Amino acid sequence: MEPTFEGGLNIAVKIPKHKYDQTVSFYRDILKLEVTEKPITNPTVSRTHKVKFGNNIMWLDCVDNYTHSETWLELNVEDVEKATDYLVSKGIKTCDELEELPENMHWVTDPAGTVFIVKRKD
């Protein structure tokens, strides 16, 4: 049986350091969305802000070594390893070297380069 994929609640926007403060200000001060800085310990993300974005949570991640923004999305599945095996069988390889993540989760990309975290449904 093939796995079922569902879009998750979390959206991560990876933002270059030189654009980070302006971007946080856009969501907080111009759009007037609920924005809260959260502590983070991650080798590739130096700061993060949580933004209530309708029914979703948008994470504004400051990345020191990026030159442009990227949007990363969440895919929820019942069984991460079966879903990952299925994706690999379709030519979609994991790219877990992109960013540190907990065990039993994987990073994959679509053909256009959009990054997805494949994780177990909550």
Image (cartoon, rainbow, N blue to C red):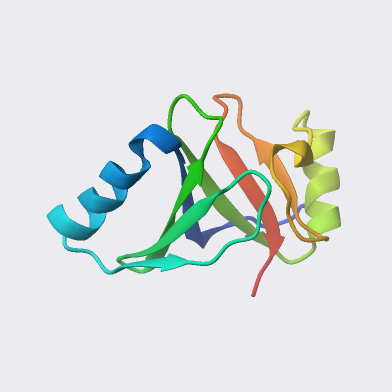
Residue 97 seen from this side:
yes
Q: Left of 85 or right of it: where is 117?
A: left
* Residue most extreme to the bottom: 122
Compared with 58, 93 (above or below) is above
**Residue 40 % position (x, y):** 58, 62
Camera-nearest residue between 40 and 87: 40
Q: Quadrant of the N terminus?
A: bottom right
**Residue 57 % position (x, y):** 42, 64
Q: Quadrant of the C terminus?
A: bottom right
**Residue 97 % position (x, y):** 77, 37
Residue that appears at 30% across and 66% down: 54
Q: Left of 120 or right of it: where is 104?
A: right
Residue that appears at 48% across and 45% down: 62
Camera-nearest residue between 72 and 29: 29
Q: Left of 52 or right of it: where is 117?
A: right
Camera-nearest residue between 47 and 101: 47
* Tally of numbered discs: 0
